[in-house]
Image (cartoon, grey):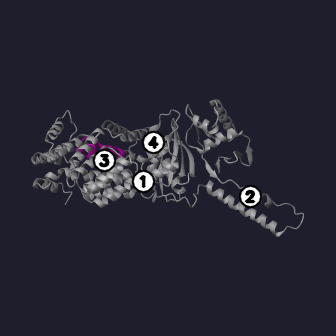
Amino acid sequence: MGYGFGPFRLDTRAKVLRRGDRIVNLKPKVVETLIVLVENHGRRVAKDELLRAVWPDAFVEEGSLAQNISILRKALGGKDEVSYIETIPKRGYCFVAAVEPTIDTPKAVLSAEQSAVPTPPRRRQTGSRIAIAVGGVVAIFLTVIGVWKVTNRLPPPSANVRSVAVLPFVDNSPSGNQDYFAEGMTDALNTSLAKSPGLLVVSHTSAMQFKHPRQSLLEIARLLKVDGIVEGSVSREGGRVRITAKLVDGRTDLNLWSNSYRRDVGDVLGLQEEVAETITRAIGGRVSRKGRPAVAVRLKPEALDSYLKARKLVSYRTQQQLEQSIAEYRRAIAIEPSYALAYAGLGDAYALLASYDLAPGAEMYPKLLEAAKSSLALDPTLSEAHTLLGLEALYHQWNWPVADAAFRRGVELNPSYATGHQRYGLALMWMGRFEEALEQIRMAQQLDPLSPMVYGNEGSVLMHARRYDEAIQFFRTALERKLDFFGNRDLTAAAYLGKRMYDSAISELGTALRMGGGPIVNARLAHVYAVSGRRREAVATLADLLEPRKAPHVSDYGIAIAYAGFGETDRAMARLMNEFHARSRTMVYLGQDLYLDPIRKDPRFRDLVRRVGLFE
């Protein structure tokens, strides 16, 4: 195996570095240092890692490593010097040049090459010697063709990479404080790759779990069920950024493609598209630019910074950080009014505040709609913005035909958008279209295989379809796979409630509360206490819900399902009517929520369902 970079060729078996036809005279340990760096190109290699790799059975001072690096820099320099080895202060070294795998010329071919060189004949050539010469020429030709294919990044026909995961890029910035920038670049590359027709791209959420991996790339590919792994690094200093990326076959650990880029920070959006298209071509895929806006992709660095900071803040899902993300998105838009992704991100932050009952939906959804429309006016191909239109149409307008069309358009534009499939699947569930819902949720699981929330959505569909035994078994499997969070416990409790296994339901709700479940979980606990005859606990839990200091964020819908457990239909209906007049998203749940089953036959409830208009 060998590698090529610039005018150099590194033979890792013979431990020889060549510049053109000339061997560069280096001591074995110096070459071994170079091999470790080149085989990990684009990734920071810590000093202690290098020391262990080069001197595995001896204690060596760090100065020996520094001396090897110095010798390598001189050997790789010259009048056409290129920056090959970057020092990451106090952390290690990174080989930053573009690297290509090369085909080592076999000795047999070299012999044939020598025999093919014409010499003045001393006697008549025999047929066999002519055949040897011809064979040598053919062998050389085939070898040259093979090398040409590799150096021009044409993948082997056997690569057949149809699914990839982009692992979190390493922050190699000298300051060491650009983690949010590296994470944003990873997410953006993920999104750009997902635009490639026929290529399945695993969600950034699942890939982020391998930010500091202990597993090999082969093991990560197996866990994520992908054919290829993209990994790399980002180094930002001032207004310049260097991105190094490589594509590795997740079944063979072979490097299929790699490169390194240096750009102004404002050019990184265009760079992401370029890298994504190069990777797509490297695996034999098709690049489609149909429908993409013909606008400049250069951004002011300040706008990009605010956008990436907002993306990081959104991932925490708390009220404070969601509100901070909104401020950052607005700042990005103020700096770059044509920033379509920033508008889509802003709309998503509004959607999350509403869905977690952290802000009134009546206030959030109109803002979401405005942001989504602004995004689509700039880029009609953004799946995220179409999905936001679906959320607003369903949960605020209660208009299923419009919502259905928007959700479907979102997943058509980007089949690798896991959140789009997830949100569409849950919408179909609330409409009672359970088989279609399962299809969308399972697609989301394939794209985001390590998310407990996405995984649990399948159990949610089974439970709302009243397939209680299947739902319980499903959540037991989730526990075994360590895909557990309070929402899954909450849904398991509902399945037990459906089977009238009240003690089990109470136990699961208690666990959900300890894991971070909010007031809605307490409301369900009051309901189960009431229907199981444990009136004292039911009354005490309801009293806590009605005390603003103890439950400041409880919704009228939560109080309604608690009252439904007590058989207090009048009070339950009064609370539901409050939600109706506030145009609450909770009205979408009326058709399927089994906690409302005790009042479902009441004429006023049936009339409310009719007035919402979703379930006709």
Q: Amino acid at mark 2?
A: Ala
Name the mark on residue 488: 3
**Which mark is first along the chain, 4 or 3?**
4
Query: Mark 1 highlights which residue?
Result: 293
Between 376 and 218, the one lying in front of the other is 218
Label 2, secondary structure: give it: helix
* Helix, strand or loop status at disc 3: helix
Select label 3 or label 4 by which is in front: 3
The reply to whether discs 3 and 2 touch (Cβ–Cβ < 8 Å) is: no
Local packing at callout 3 (Cα closer than 10 Å; few below 14, some 14-19, many 20+) is: many
| Magenta segment | 343-372
User: In the image, which is nearer the foreground, mark 3 or mark 2?
Assistant: 3
Contact between labelled residues 2 and 1, with CB atoms less than 8 Å apart: no
Secondary structure at badge 4 equals: helix
The part of the image, by quadrant, that contains residue 591 is: bottom left
Look at the picture and state if 513 lies above or below 462. above
Q: Between label 1 and label 2, give the one nearer the viewer.
A: 2
- The reply to whether the magenta stretch includes residue 357 is yes
Q: Of the residues shown, which amino acid type is indicated by label 4?
A: Glu
Residue at the spot of label 4: 183
| Marks 1, 4: nearer the viewer | 4
Q: Which badge, 3 or 2, comes first in the chain's sequence?
A: 2
Using the rendered view, name the quadrant where residue 131 is placed. Answer: bottom right
Identify residue for label 2: 108
